[in-house]
Image (tube, rainbow, N blue to C red):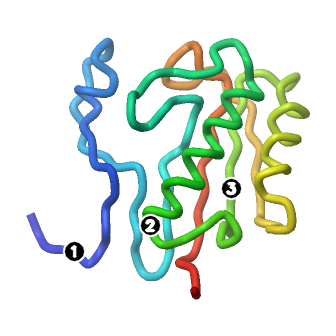
């Protein structure tokens, strides 16, 4: 393996995080490279316990995803105000208002570019929304 100047935060293997699926991928929750923070898509899951939260409640899942994003950005040396792009995946177009209203509370005044996509399903059937974000490092 070659050395890299990228910083990889919260490394994991899908064999452990998705034991019900036959996977074996080395991933992480965030990568900092070239002054940019790239986050893995966040869902309604507690990052420390790996427990799903807000099952059946898209707003609660969105709150957890945004809390995860805020926490990961802080760990990477960034913050919500430094987000430049978000992509929101929902499994039902009827969830759009609840999801965007919740995201809007977290990103008030930030003005990132945003893409919204309706997908057939996410990695687990109980997950209703997934949000990925890209941010720059804070100039604190």
Q: How far apart, in angstroms, are the residues tagged by discs 1 and 3? A: 26 Å
Which secondary structure, mark 1?
loop
For marks 2 and 1, the one nearer the N-term is: 1
**Along the horizontal axis of the image, is 132 left or right of 9?**
right
Q: Measuring from the top left, give residue 127's x and y in whole percent.
A: 60, 22
Nearer the observer, disc 2 or disc 3? 2
| Residue 76 numbered mark, or none | 2
Instruction: Identify the residue position indicated by label 3 in the image.
Output: 86
Above or below residue 99? Residue 33 is below
Q: Which residue is mark 1?
A: 4
* Percent coordinates x, y for residue 67 in the rendering: 61, 45
Q: Position of residue 23 (x, y in %)?
A: 26, 26
Spatial CA span between label 2 and label 3: 17 Å
SS at mark 2 in the image: helix
Quadrant of the rendered image containing residue 48: top left
Q: Nearer the viewer, residue 112 or 2?
A: 112
């Amino acid at each position: 393996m070659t050395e890299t100047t990228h910083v990889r935060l919260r490394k994991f293997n899908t064999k452990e995080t998705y034991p019900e699926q036959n996977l074996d991928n080395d991933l992480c929750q965030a990568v900092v490279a070239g002054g940019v923070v790239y986050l893995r898509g966040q869902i309604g899951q507690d990052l420390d316990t790996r427990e799903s939260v807000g099952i059946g409640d898209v707003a609660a899942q969105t709150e957890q995803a945004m809390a995860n994003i805020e926490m990961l950005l802080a760990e990477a040396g960034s913050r919500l105000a430094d987000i430049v792009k978000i992509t929101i995946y929902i499994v039902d177009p009827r969830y759009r208002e609840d999801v965007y209203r919740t995201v809007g509370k977290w990103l008030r005044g930030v003005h990132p570019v945003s893409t919204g996509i309706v997908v057939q399903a996410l990695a687990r059937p109980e997950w209703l929304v997934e949000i990925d974000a890209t941010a720059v490092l804070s100039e604190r």
